Image (cartoon, rainbow, N blue to C red):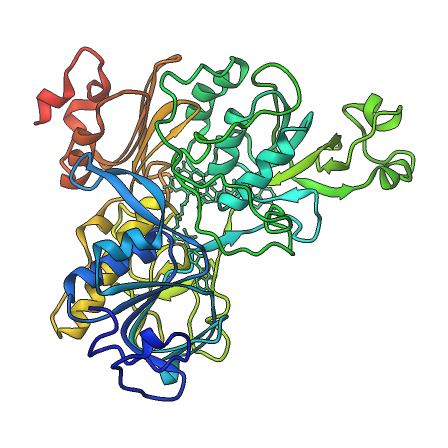
Amino acid sequence: MFFTSDISCLSTHTSSESEGMACSTNSEKRVKFVVVGGGIAGVTCAEQLASQFTSDSVVLLTAAPLVKTVTNYKRVAKILEDFDVEEQPSTVLEGKYPNLKVIQSAVKTLQAEEHTLHTEDERSFHYEKLCLCSGAKPKLLNRNNPHVLGIRDTDSAQEFQKRLSTARRIVVVGNGGIALELVYEVEGCEVIWAVKDEAIGNTFFDAGAAQFLIPSLALDKPERAMPCKRARYTTEPVADGAAAGMSEATVETGSALGPDWHEGISLRGAEKGSHNVTVEYQCGIKQICTQQEILQSPPGGPQSSDAGDVFFGGTWPVYVQLTNGKTYGCDFIVSATGVVPNTEPFLHGNNFELGADGGLLVDEHMHTTVLDVFAAGDVCSAGWEPSPLWQQMRLWTQARQMGWYAGRCIAAEVLEEPIELDFCFELFTHITKFFNYKVVLLGKFNAQGLGQDHELLLRCTKGHEYIKVVLSNGRMMGAVLIGQTELEETFENLILNQMDLSAYGEHLLDPNIDIEDYFD
Ligand SMILES: Cc1cc2nc3c(=O)[nH]c(=O)nc-3n(C[C@H](O)[C@H](O)[C@H](O)COP(=O)(O)OP(=O)(O)OC[C@H]3O[C@@H](n4cnc5c(N)ncnc54)[C@H](O)[C@@H]3O)c2cc1C
Ligand SMILES: NC(=O)C1=CN([C@@H]2O[C@H](COP(=O)(O)OP(=O)(O)OC[C@H]3O[C@@H](n4cnc5c(N)ncnc54)[C@H](OP(=O)(O)O)[C@@H]3O)[C@@H](O)[C@H]2O)C=CC1
């Protein structure tokens, strides 16, 4: 149970907390396990520890007022999984695990050599084992410009919604998950979508899949067949100033949004109508400027695609000069340009090694390079030799899998038991929805790292399904399944068992062959 023998509470916060506890120093609580972060990785790790060590205390420290929990978990195939994520008050979690205590306070400093953490509200914790699950934050184009927004948590989503409601035109920059979701979900507002690449959705798709999806942007968004049964994320108004998008002044403390985050909120601009998206390919942002700066541009400067607005009276709060020479005035800019691991404030004074992407480097046991400190989810960089069919991507699924596995690794270390890298890291799997299509990604779905040493098989029925299989030496290495293909389980098996499929050639995707019966 929490606050019993193994947690020595010497905090001066409440007398009830202090009762019957031995002290280590005057203001320090001794806890067996501390997990930092109330996102999906931290919560899963804390649950794993709390259920495995029922007579030891687990403290979950989080900067956000609500915690994220996995609900409706479904195993779709051996590894492929699907689940919902809900924000819940910490009491729900504490109700499930009596030895788990959630404390809402951001960690201010970590003194790893002393095994001590200090929080913003002046509490101190001495841990035996620590797991850092502090997530990531948006890598914004410009953190100081109030016209540039990022979307990460419920506060920033709410700010986006508020600004959108009066907007006539926005510019979305980036070509990954958030941009794909936004350009499809936003209605009643012109969207200029600036992508660096030749095709949309480069973090998830190749040009073929992009070609399949892009017509959806020219159609009206279908009415949702069934309204969302319940809001999964809070949309309560927040205090003024607390939701300032993701500019520098913003308190970046919330957990990341996730599947269907936009279902509970209206993403409608000031105009009538549905989609109105213009994609500007192969360009980035040259400059973000005011109207005055635009007017002062030297002759022969940036060409304007909407010169009427820019140069003849129309005014916009902000102007975006693209590297393709066009300039757009808009209400605001969404920077959907990826994330950086949230390693602050843990790095200061500690010897964490970082991965190439700036995450806390972890080995195959989710151990960082610092004694007794583990990490999981968006904050970490997988430092082990990955399976040829797996790669790290900062997604819900991996946050859950890593949090769960980190909990098991911590337990194994405490119990001095051996543990092998979990099977879920054998194969990359992701199930999601883009442009109202179910999307399943398996293995090396974009032939990542395969160089020229691969061939592709494709099957596409416009408006219905897009199937791409990546083969190398006759073995299936990856697949993209868009639409209700029902092939995920069979393909997952074929990728995992690495069966030689050379003999089947293109028949592998022959719509007249029931491939499921064939291989099951
Ligand atoms: C808009 C959006 C849509 C997304 N959609 C999908 C999707 O459809 N599918 C998918 O798979 N993935 C999606 N993702 C990605 C997914 O949400 C993340 O990969 C995942 O949530 C990461 O979980 P995490 O627990 O590692 O981090 P987070 O959820 O970011 O949680 C980090 C936690 O750490 C806490 N914290 C941070 N610093 C401190 C500190 N100093 N002290 C104490 N606590 C701290 C925060 O309060 C938070 O509770 C989406 C992300 C965004 C932003
Ligand atoms: N349904 C899902 O699975 C969803 C998942 N997510 C996850 O949430 C996280 C945040 O999403 P998101 O921000 O979209 O991140 P992503 O990593 O998915 O995409 C970032 C995109 O921005 C591009 N980019 C980076 N820097 C610049 C720049 N300076 N100018 C122009 N383009 C740039 C990247 O290009 P390049 O790759 O060439 O650097 C990439 O196309 C990600 O981990 C993502 O996977 C988010 C929404 C939905």
Front residue (pair 307, 388)? 307
Residue 477 on image: x %, y %: 26, 38
Front residue (pair 430, 145)? 145
Q: In the picture, residue 422 is in which quadrant?
A: bottom left
Residue 462 on image: x %, y %: 39, 12
Residue drawn at x 61%, y 54% is 250
Residue 306 on image: x %, y %: 78, 23
Q: Is residue 336 left or right of residue 163?
A: left
Residue 510 on image: x %, y %: 22, 15
Q: Is residue 124 left or right of residue 246?
A: left
In the displayed structure, would residue 388 be above or below residue 295? below
Front residue (pair 4, 19)? 19
In the displayed structure, would residue 250 be above or below residue 127? above
In the displayed structure, would residue 62 be above or below residue 463? below
Residue drawn at x 78%, y 32% is 316
Front residue (pair 500, 327)? 327
Residue reaching furthest to the front: 15
User: Can residue 352 be seen from the camera position used here?
Assistant: yes
Q: Is residue 71 left or right of residue 335?
A: left
Residue drawn at x 50%, y 50% is 339
